Amino acid sequence: MRKLLNDIERICRLGLDSRTLRSRVMARLRQDVRYDAFCFGTIDPWTLLITDDVSGGIPPGNAALASHNEYLEADVDKFADLARTGRTVGILGHSTGGDPRRSPRFHTVLPIIGAEHELRAVFLADGECWGAVSLFRRGEQTDFTSREAALVRALSRPVAVALRRACVNTPPPAPQGVPAPGVLVLDKAGRTLVANETARRAGCTSSARSPSTRWRRRPGPGEATRRICGCGPVPDAGCRCGVRR
């Protein structure tokens, strides 16, 4: 464990941008914790929404399916639950009492990768969550172990601190191709609380004094993915910033 922790801490001190940091961390982690696929996302510590992801071994075009499970289905080891409880790491086989088939994610998300085993972890510093990762193994592999969970758990703070630093120091990338979905959260007065880069570029942020602002209520617990947007009520086809119902 000590060598892995030392190597990860060294990577975290390099001042890398967020995506390079996550790729380097995953490459080093794989030497000690085998996986066939992974998805490593940054997390907004205020809303606990995933804001970006770096992945490997996962076919493209399945983000909506994973998001539906993460935010709209009851399931074990949700990133928000791991963060709020401070448990930080969960193994699907353990969290389902040895029967991963009890998890909806086992039937919807894992088959995309041909996986049967999953380890999830969040990265916390000073009580705030700055990142989350899912590791997957295919059925012919053995399940993740408690020792491997302990290895990942030991990385929580140094990786979170590096992600926080990268978030502050790294300018947003130039838009390329189809924009990511816009995320906008308003308070009861219609003022913007949180807006991701897509929503800001589209001019969807608003103030309480803006006469043209129309908005849906702020999501309550368990409703984090009911997108709301300053463009107005969000139609089924989505608004110009990519926000969808």
Image (cartoon, rainbow, N blue to C red):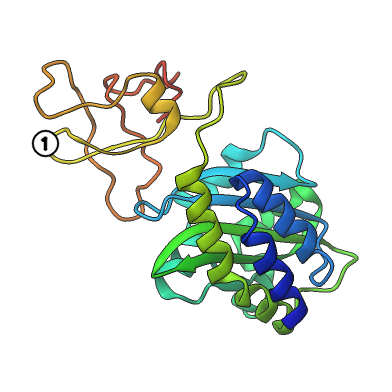
Relative to 240, is 18 on the left or the right?
right
Residues 182 and 155: in front is: 155
Residue sitting at x 35%, y 48%: 223
Q: Say if 124 sits above or below 51 in the image.
A: below
At 40% across and 55% down in the image, what residue appears?
45
Residue 176 % position (x, y): 61, 20
Q: At which x and y percent is residue 121?
A: 59, 66
Residue positioned most to the right: 140
Foreground residue among 9 and 112:
9
* SS type, badge 1: loop
State the residue in front, 172 or 53: 172
120 to the left or right of 4 = left
Residue 71 position, x and y percent, is: 46, 50
Q: Say which amino acid is labelled 1.
A: Ala
**Residue 60 in view of the camera:** yes
Q: Position of residue 141 (x, y in %)?
A: 88, 68
Residue 109 visible to an observer of this rendering: no
Which residue does the numbered mark 1 point to in the structure image?
189
Residue displayed at 28% across by 45% down: 219
Which corner quadrant of the image does residue 116 belong to?
bottom right
Above or below 227: residue 128: below
Q: Quadrant of the C terminus?
A: top left
